[in-house]
Image: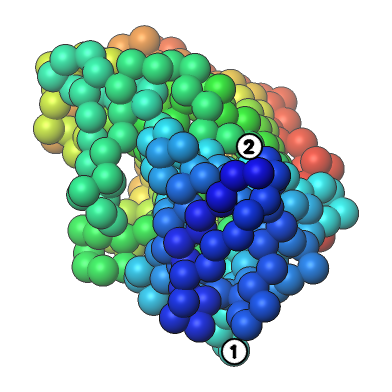
Amino acid sequence: MKKVLFALTVVAMLFSACSSDEEDVNFFDGNELKGDIVEEVSLSASIEYKLTGTLSIKDGGILRIPAGTVIKANKGFANYVIVEQGGQIFAEGTSGKPVKFTSGASSPAAADWGGLIINGYAPISGATSGTEGQTEVNEDLPYGGNVIADNSGVLTYVILEYTGARSNEDVEHNGLTLNGVGNGTRIENIYIPNGADDGVEFFGGSVNVKNLLVVNPDDDMFDVTQGWTGTLDNCYGVWESGYTSTESDPRGVEADGNLDGKGEDHVDQSNFKIKNMTIVNESAYEMNDVIKIRRGATATITNALAIGGTTGDIVDLTDSRGGANAATSISLTVQDVTGNQLKEDGNGDNVSFATGNTGATTSVFDWTSYGF
């Protein structure tokens, strides 16, 4: 028997218990999640949890969340879940019983709570290989390194809604933030509706993501920066009728090679793939760009489909801090989108406005009950 320590606030007391390798957490006097996980802990699908502060899975800690578990977050910037370097999360839902992170507010809305952050040891862009970055919402927590196959756990059939709480205009959460996450981590079947800032943002790393549905993000649907080298396969982003944004430049895809364009000469810049992607704008709100690749990023985008709405540029490969890498390749079919087709500065030879691209396969999202 080993002592499993789970530092969390439960009626202002520290809960600890003795267990075997997995512990079914029963709160007795409450169901609140907050604090540090330092060893292996399993939640119970029979309990509806309240996230009342920051829940941190520390180095060596493991959090297991079974299918059907619901976690409702109190409103506030500090209410979020973060998997630190060396920690792991196993949120393993099923199509019939997803794991759900949501707002506990009586009238939930975007930016009610933080979201889910994972920090890994995989490479990010920097002056040298092995560079570390600092987590946007907590600069004391590093990410990045040299472990391409780093494993931070499993997310499958997971809902993250009403995320994106903001501290200020430069510090805000996304739905899912992947900081230097390695490709030993499995992430697939993810639904991120009605969040502030980006649906998903990759800060470097090598992780692959499959079957991702993002609905009404306040900023970008799919955001890449700081050296991401993975693949996003079968992704669908949509702005519904009536959508508006508080952001100045919301996009379908926004991709940087290095962080904020401040490292034009950095190594390990973003070189990623997106395949089987659909971006839809059903609203009257103008999208800044459907696809923006800039600041040294190399993107290979295949079987992409853009449908509806207005935009400044359908594809933009330019930026004042450096344009897309010339090796960028995009195949995009456009249906009923009003806007300039291509903005480039001598690096647009590999952009094809093809016919017949089908984009994402929507049937894999049946489990979300979203009405396409």
Which type of secondary structure does the marked residue at label 1 adopt?
loop
In the rendered image, the quadrant that contains the N terminus is top right
Nearer-the-camera pick, 221 or 11: 11
Name the residue at the right extreme.
Answer: 96
- Which residue is at 23% across, 14% downward? 129
Q: Residues within 10 Å of mark 1 (few under 14, many from 20)?
A: few
- The vertical placement of 315 against 347, above or below, is below
Residue depicted at x 37% and y 58%: 173
Image coordinates of residue 3 in percent, x first then y, are 56, 50
Tag 1 residue? 106
Residue sticking out furthest to the bottom: 106
Above or below, 297 against 312 in this view is above
The residue that appears at 58% across and 35% down in the rendered structure is: 153
Q: Which of 141 and 344 lies nearest the eye of the viewer?
A: 141
**What residue type is disc 1 on?**
Ser
- Identity of the residue drawn at 41% across and 45% down: 58
User: Which residue is denoted by mark 2 in the rendering?
Assistant: 154
Quadrant of the image occupied by residue 143: top left
Is there any visible trace of residue 302 in the rendered image? yes
Residue 283 is left or right of residue 70, and the answer is left
- Residue 359 image offset from top left, x and y in percent: 68, 33
For this orientation, the residue located farthest to the front is: 1
Where residue 271 appears, as percent x and y from the top left, is: 39, 18
What is the total number of numbered labels drawn onto the structure image? 2
Mark in the foreground, 2 or 1: 2
Residue 341 visible (yes or no): no
Q: Residues within 10 Å of mark 2 (few under 14, many from 20)?
A: some
Do tag 2 and tag 1 residues touch (Cβ < 8 Å)?
no
Q: CA distance from mark 2 to mark 1?
A: 30 Å
Q: In the rendered image, which quarter is residue 98 located in?
A: bottom right
